[in-house]
Image (cartoon, rainbow, N blue to C red):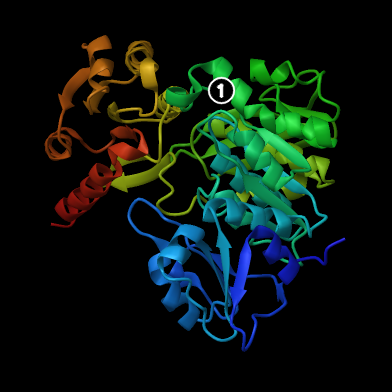
Amino acid sequence: MPVTGVLTINDICEIGEVVFSVISAPPLEIVEPNVSIDSREITEGGIFIALKGERTDGHCYIDAVFQQGACWAMVNRAWYEAAGLPEPPVGKGFIITNDTVIGLQRLASMYRNTFSIPVVAIGGSNGKTTTKEMVAAVLGTTFKVTMSQGNRNNHIGVPLTLLQLRRETGIAVVEVGINHPGEMAELSDIVRPTHALLTNIGHEHLEFLIDLDGVAAAELQLFDYLQASGGTAFINLDDERLKTLFTKLSAPYGYAISQQLGALCWAHSVTVERNGRLTFSLASEKGREKIILNFTGKHNVINAVAAATVGLHFGLPLSVICKGLEALVPVKGWKRLEVMDAAGVRILNDTYNANADSMRLAIDAICDMPCDGLRIAVLADMLELGAAADVEHERIGEYLRQKPVDRIFTFGEKARLICWQCLEKCGCHFDTQEALLHTLLAELHTGDVVLFKGSRGMKLERVVDALVKAKTITQEG
């Protein structure tokens, strides 16, 4: 069994060809390594992984990371040969691979294998990051938790998360995100989860996953891994595609919004306060506990119930679980239904990303919030929908027709279709953010509640930031 939290020279030699100075080699063992793809984050004894991205190439910083104290630099063989087979500084070394991304993944997998701790993987179409934060908050009341930071949930972020494990870590909570078929199987092999949770199966990344069947097939590879390895699955019984697995998996734990057969945990009496916060009771067979959640949007109740279910499985009482959830506050700049104030105008900033399901949930959230003025939705394009783009935007317009949203403003090529489906509510469509901002500054009044929602690539947060700044300056003036 490998020593916990240690990478050895033998591990490193399995990843690629090793080259070091004939005068002095790097350390033969690295305890709790500092592994980074950012040259600015390297510290003494660290390992630098040179990745080539769209804007920069990590190989340009090899000399700098060695000077900063890195003991190893993982580089692509093509770069190493083109550079004339350089010898590293004394006491330093190169790890030469055909692909440094694969090298990073193998390094992380080796390191993870030195730990015999519970590893909870969290995937799904919507709510992954929020659920990950909630699960970590709950488990963190009792255990030392290492979790994914920010949105590090892809083929690069997941390995970096695993490399943050430390000897005192009691449980790891790892977010896993995909957008192509087969990616979940690859991530599962790297993470080797002992427990896993899929939030839901929804309309995500249809450009690559095609339809809900494609999404389900891709996401459910996480549960396939658990079934083969004897792990534990947490099942959202309110999701019809996931519910069908409850009787098929060997060790399932169910949860739902309301009490039903198979649910370990559920919720009661959900209300939305004026500031957007959610009040409800968490319930299980052992009792109930009232909770005030510092998140908005009723869909976040199911995320909290999911986290509570994980906590119950690990032996935490409801009272402790509720304390963990109540202590969790969305970080500033969260951009996931973040409630902001602009001179009396309440803003729901949900500009982090968007697909058809999360768009509907955000619309529901603004409809549930108490409002003294108008409910206004500012919506931008949903990207990565492929051939389904037109029909999905049109369906959002149809959905809005049935909801108590007073006015809609849209921005982007496809978002125009939303307005066309509910012309009676459409204030205007905009091709530039400047024109959109100018109109909002004139149209918004104290008491209004405004939702901003769009895919990350639409950069709608720029309008939010400019609006808050302009409204504040106007109020102060």
Q: Quadrant of residue 447?
A: top left
Q: Is residue 307 above or below residue 365?
A: below
Q: Position of residue 32 (x, y in %)?
A: 69, 70
Question: Is 323 in front, or is 20?
Answer: 20
Residue at the (79%, 43%) spot, across then down: 194
Q: Is residue 41 above or below residue 249?
A: below
Question: Is 105 in front, or is 325?
Answer: 105
Local crowd size for mark 1, using a 10 Å CA cut-off: few (<14), some (14–19), many (≥20): many
User: Circle 1 sits in a helix, a strand or a loop, which is it?
Assistant: helix
Asked if residue 347 lies left or right of residue 152, the reply is left
Q: Is residue 221 above or below residue 438?
A: above
Q: Quadrant of residue 463?
A: top left
Which residue is farthest bottom?
23
Residue at the (23%, 12%) spot, across then down: 420
Asked if residue 231 lies left or right of residue 44, the reply is right
Q: Position of residue 79 (x, y in %)?
A: 44, 62
Examine the rendering and report whether any part of residue 265 can be seen: no
- Quadrant location, the C terminus: bottom left
Residue at the (81%, 28%) spot, across then down: 252
- Quadrant location, the N terminus: bottom right
Examine the rendering and report whether any part of residue 402 can be seen: yes
Q: Is residue 118 above or below residue 392?
A: below
Q: Quadrant of residue 121?
A: top right
Asked if residue 380 lies left or right of residue 84, the reply is left
Question: Is 332 in front, or is 267?
Answer: 332
Question: Is 464 in front, or is 194?
Answer: 194
Residue at image mark 1: 215
Q: Position of residue 328 (x, y in %)?
A: 58, 51
Q: Amino acid at mark 1?
A: Val
Q: Position of residue 37 (x, y in %)?
A: 49, 62
Residue at the (75%, 20%) spot, across then down: 245
